[in-house]
């Protein structure tokens, strides 16, 4: 880990953008893919600013679209480092959308992007440690570790050595028909 730990606020990036008709789908709502692309950009900016290295996206934790975003709304994304490992960082992003006429805001989604710092030769490189200043900082840090653990459990349970007999009963009550050849 690099010598000098940093404050979380050193990573904060906020972007806002007015949603244009060209960003919408046929039902007049903003494309989820457009929002994901904006989120990736803000995660990249946040991780790169914090680490001092250009970063790549290693993984994206679940993105649940909680509310549709309309054309003409102002979308704001706030990104902050939640966790740092050796070369990786988890960037928490909160997405809100504002009706600029009424001022009403809604929470559209929150997600977690794992970004990895790379040096000029393309090798992964150490990032600064994170100074945790509050109970909330500790909670977010530990929650990231918990997410990693859950992900590991998931991929080992349904990995390449998946045993059909051990899991077949899990299909009960699902909307499927088993037609194994
Ligand atoms: C992500 C990437 C840098 C990992 O490289 P690697 O050689 O496997 O590196 P390592 O195994 O040394 O892992 C480096 C760090 O990345 C983390 N990491 C690797 N794969 C990860 C994944 N899928 N999800 C979350 N973190 C991951 C490791 O936990 C490690 O973290 P740490 O240093 O904090 O302990 C590499 O796979 C890569 O460059 N992927 C492509 C990224 C990219 O192009 N993104 C844009 C997609 S269009």
Image: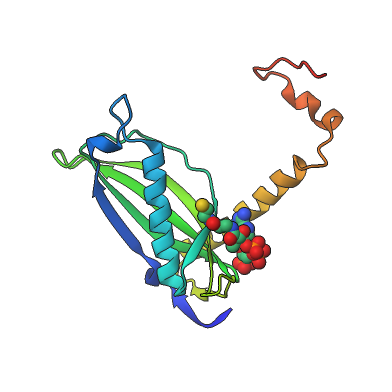
- Give the vertical position of 176 relative to 101 (above or below): above
Residue at the image position 39 percent from the left and 55 percent from the top: 41
Towards the viewer: 32 or 103: 32
- Give the vertical position of 118 relative to 41 (above or below): below
The C terminus appears in which quarter of the rendering? top right
Q: Is residue 145 visible?
A: no
- Outermost residue to the front: 121
Q: Is residue 47 visible?
A: yes
- Outermost residue to the bottom: 3
Residue at the image position 43 percent from the left and 60 percent from the top: 44
The scheme the figure's colours follow is rainbow
Residue at the image position 41 percent from the left and 40 percent from the top: 33
Q: Residue 15 placed where, x, y %?
A: 29, 56
> Number of numbered discs present?
0
Ligand 1 image position (quadrant):
bottom right
Q: Residue 75 placed where, x, y %?
A: 28, 46
The N terminus appears in which quarter of the rendering? bottom right
Residue at the image position 20 percent from the left and 39 percent from the top: 99
> Is 88 left or right of 24, judged from the image as shown?
right
Towards the viewer: 1 or 125: 125
> Is 131 left or right of 35, judged from the image as shown?
right
Towards the viewer: 49 or 106: 49
The quarter holding residue 109 reads top left
Q: Residue 117 placed where, x, y %?
A: 53, 68
- Give the vertical position of 175 relative to 132 (above or below): above
Q: Residue 148 placed where, x, y %?
A: 63, 54
């Amino acid at each position: 880990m690099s010598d000098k730990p940093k404050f979380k606020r050193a990573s904060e990036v906020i972007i806002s953008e007015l949603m244009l008709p060209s960003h919408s789908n046929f039902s007049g709502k903003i494309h989820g893919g457009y929002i994901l692309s904006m989120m990736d950009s803000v995660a990249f900016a946040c991780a790169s600013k914090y680490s001092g290295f250009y970063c790549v996206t290693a993984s994206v934790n679940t993105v649940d679209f909680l509310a549709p975003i309309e054309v003409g709304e102002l979308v704001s994304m706030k990104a902050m480092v939640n966790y740092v490992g050796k070369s990786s960082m988890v960037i928490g992003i909160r997405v809100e959308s504002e009706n600029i006429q009424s001022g009403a805001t809604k929470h559209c989604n929150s997600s977690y992007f794992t970004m990895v710092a790379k040096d000029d030769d393309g090798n992964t490189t150490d990032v600064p440690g994170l100074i945790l200043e509050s109970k909330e900082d500790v909670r977010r840090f530990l929650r990231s570790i918990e997410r990693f653990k859950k992900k590991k459990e998931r991929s080992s349970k349904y990995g390449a050595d998946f045993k059909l007999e051990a899991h077949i009963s899990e299909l009960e009550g699902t909307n499927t028909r088993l037609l194994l050849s």
